[in-house]
Image (cartoon, rainbow, N blue to C red):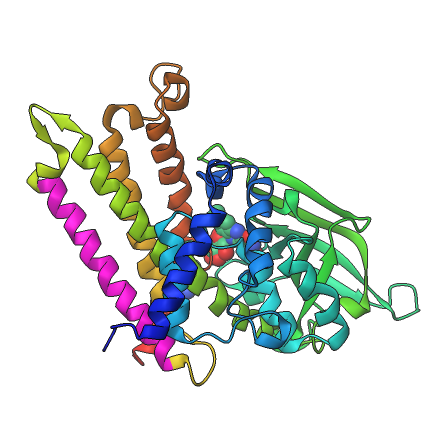
Amino acid sequence: MDIRFTDEELAFQTEVQQFFANVMDDELKAKLHGVEASPDLKGGMIDYQRRLNAKGWMAPGWPVEYGGQDWSVTQHFIFNAERGKVGAPPPIPFGVTMVAPVIYTYGSEEQKARFLPRILNSDDWWCQGYSEPGAGSDLASLQCKAERDGDGSGDHYVVNGSKIWTSFAQAADWIFCLVRTDNSGRKQDGISFLLVDMTTPGVTVSPIDTIDGIYHLNEVHFDNARVPAENLIGEEGKGWTYAKSLLVHERLSIAEVAESKRNLEQLRELARAEVNGGESLLQDPVFAKRLADVEIDLMALEFTELRVLASAADGGMPGPESSLLKLQGTTIQQSIQELRMDVAGYYSQTLQGDLSPAQLGNDFADFAQKQYFRGRASSIYGGSDEVQKNVTAKHVLGL
Ligand SMILES: Cc1cc2nc3c(=O)[nH]c(=O)nc-3n(C[C@H](O)[C@H](O)[C@H](O)COP(=O)(O)OP(=O)(O)OC[C@H]3O[C@@H](n4cnc5c(N)ncnc54)[C@H](O)[C@@H]3O)c2cc1C
């Protein structure tokens, strides 16, 4: 595989570097520091995402006609690598990476015109209503019900049921939901894809406490919520097909190679600075080996991602390979989070007496701890490790 850049690609790389150097001023950097683990994710990201949109780079992966870029795989690679180097995060995925491809692929012209520009400009914030108390890995068992024609007029669905683990529902304007519209046949065939305004009467959100101490998870309840039938995507009963295509986008976005590269570089610097008994942590052979192992795994993941994207370039999106990338990407993220906790050492422990690391005044340890606890969930969300292994075994390796 030849990964030398052409002159045009090098020029593009310079353009991306200059853009991020201009955009990432001190104020924005401060806003974005640790934003992915912040309860005010929306407030932190909106300014940044609008700066991306002003340049036309909010959604480079979308088709050009809807506001995307006609970039090659290499250009996408360069863009993400340069973005990652300066610590600029990817946009929040629920709108731009998850529901938008479903809307532009399967939605009506009215739906495209209504929703896509507002996603690009971060006017609408979305959340994902897939999981239910009895339907996670076995998603097709979902029971949240949408009945057409609650009052005989036929222009609404009446939705009843609950969604769970809904990330950032508390800040969302819209939720895209998988709902059951038919119970008669194969369970996959009775599922539809519905867009619901979070201000609809009968929609309520209740928080779920998490180990990281940050408010990001919720239950969303629907109690006779009346949703206009025009908010149905595509055909009734075809939601399962649309849902699966969304999962591919979701899993690809979770791999986060560029972020892991930057995190590893920072970790190396921190370990170098951590001196004990005259030697830095980086000189400790056990720590150095663990760090090197993760670096090698990350390098392998980066090439696998490039290979998958390159081979899919002609035929659109990759398929089940996204499970492999998600699995390995999150395993690497968790290894980095564990190494970070080791660098923070004593201060990374949950509580020192009654004080958290933040109260002790150790910002790095606080950051390490939050990321570590938050990161435990990455082997669950977007589909658990075991499920990704099943998909990889069956559909990638053909076992
Ligand atoms: C932080 C976080 C954020 C999330 N955000 C969202 C969100 O915004 N929207 C949303 O809809 N959902 C969200 N989820 C839910 C997530 O998608 C589910 O938790 C996940 O799909 C697993 O489902 P479950 O929790 O019901 O576990 P289960 O499916 O009950 O799994 C329990 C255990 O059994 C294993 N298992 C299950 N089936 C198999 C199998 N066939 N073979 C082998 N092992 C199996 C699993 O790997 C797991 O270890 C989020 C979850 C977390 C933790």
Residue at x-position 75% and y-position 64%? 146
Which quadrant of the figure contains the N terminus? bottom left
Counting from the top left corner in percent of width and height, residue 393 is at 32, 73
Residue 91 position in % (x across, y down): 52, 54
Compared across the picture, whether 332 is left or right of 218 comes to left
Question: Is residue 30 shown above or below 163?
Answer: above
- In front here: 77 or 271? 77
Residue 135 in which image quadrant: bottom right
Q: What residue do we see at 70% from left, 50% from top?
A: 173
Residue 131 position by quadrant: bottom right
* Image location (x, y in percent) of residue 263: 31, 46
Identify the residue at image location x=51%, y=58%. Answer: 136
Q: Is residue 386 visible?
A: no
Say if residue 180 shows up in the picture: yes
- In the image, is residue 291 part of the stretch drawn in magenta? yes
| Magenta range | 286-311
The quadrant of the rendering that contains the C terminus is bottom left
- Count of marks overlaid on the render: 0
> Please, is residue 277 above or below residue 157 in the view?
above
Q: Main secondary structure of the magenta part?
A: helix
